[in-house]
């Protein structure tokens, strides 16, 4: 089975590359040192420090493998190729909630970069998926677990 392509913005690519480098160069060394110290305490069969360090080591190695796979299958969204008149991956979209009357702004990104706290939503999320391909002025009804959201697209710009 072919591996799934990872869609990233340039800033998302840099962030993942920095995390991978940090895990490989700093965290691996820290955990190796913790393991060494734990082994020096003697009997590792009842040594919680050793168990904690082994668990952290397994987590770090798993994350490294995941990041390497995602980066190997990465396709960077070129901001200059993002259309300015239709919502697409890489767009920064301003929406008006037709029921609450408030405006929301989101950047549509791939799932690896999604961070709702930073208003970066995945193209696979209910809102992201629903607004893709739509234009300024259109009203979109979005089915979400809590009911139906009604958003009007106010503005579309290229993301960062």
Image: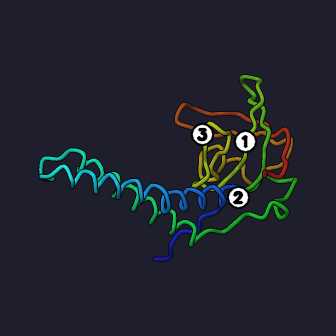
Check the image and report above or below for 24 versus 52. below
Residue 90 location (% of width, % of height): 75, 55
Q: Mark 3 points at which residue?
A: 143
Q: Is mark 2 on a helix, strand or loop?
A: loop
Q: Name the residue under label 1.
A: 106
Q: Residue extending furthest front?
A: 40
Q: Nearer the viewer, residue 12 or 111?
A: 12
- Disc 1 is placed on an element classified as strand
Q: Label 2 belongs to which residue?
A: 9
Q: Distance between the residues labelled 3 and 2?
A: 27 Å
Asked whether residue 54 appears in the rendered view, the answer is no
Q: How far apart are the two marked residues, 2 and 1, measured between alpha carbons?
A: 14 Å
Answer whether residue 158 is visible to the viewer in this image: yes
Q: Is 121 positioned to the left or the right of 48 in the image?
A: right
In the rendered image, the residue lying farthest to the top is: 100
| Residue 104 image offset from top left, x and y in percent | 74, 33
Q: How crowded is mark 2: few (under 14 residues within 10 Å), some or many (20 or more)?
A: many
Closer to the camera in the image, 107 or 36: 36
- The residue lying at 48 percent from left, 62 percent from top is 24
Residue for point 28% across, 47% down? 52
**Does residue 41 sit above or below 3 in this rendering?**
above
Q: In this view, does 82 lie above or below 151?
A: below
Q: Is residue 25 left or right of residue 148?
A: left
**Numbered circles on residues, count:** 3
């Amino acid at each position: 089975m072919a591996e799934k392509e990872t869609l990233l913005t340039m800033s998302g690519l840099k962030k993942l590359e920095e995390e991978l480098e940090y895990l490989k160069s700093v965290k691996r060394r820290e955990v190796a040192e913790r393991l060494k110290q734990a082994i020096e305490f003697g009997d590792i069969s009842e040594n919680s420090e050793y168990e904690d360090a082994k668990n952290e080591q397994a987590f770090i190695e798993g994350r490294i493998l995941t990041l390497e796979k995602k980066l190997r299958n990465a396709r960077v969204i070129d901001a200059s190729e993002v259309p300015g008149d239709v919502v697409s991956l890489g767009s920064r979209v301003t929406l008006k909630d037709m029921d609450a009357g408030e405006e929301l702004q989101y950047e549509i990104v791939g799932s690896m970069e999604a961070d709702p706290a930073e208003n970066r939503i995945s193209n696979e999320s209910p809102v992201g998926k629903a607004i893709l391909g739509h234009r300024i002025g259109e009203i979109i009804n979005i089915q979400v677990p809590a009911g139906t959201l009604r958003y009007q697209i106010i503005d579309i710009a290229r993301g960062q």
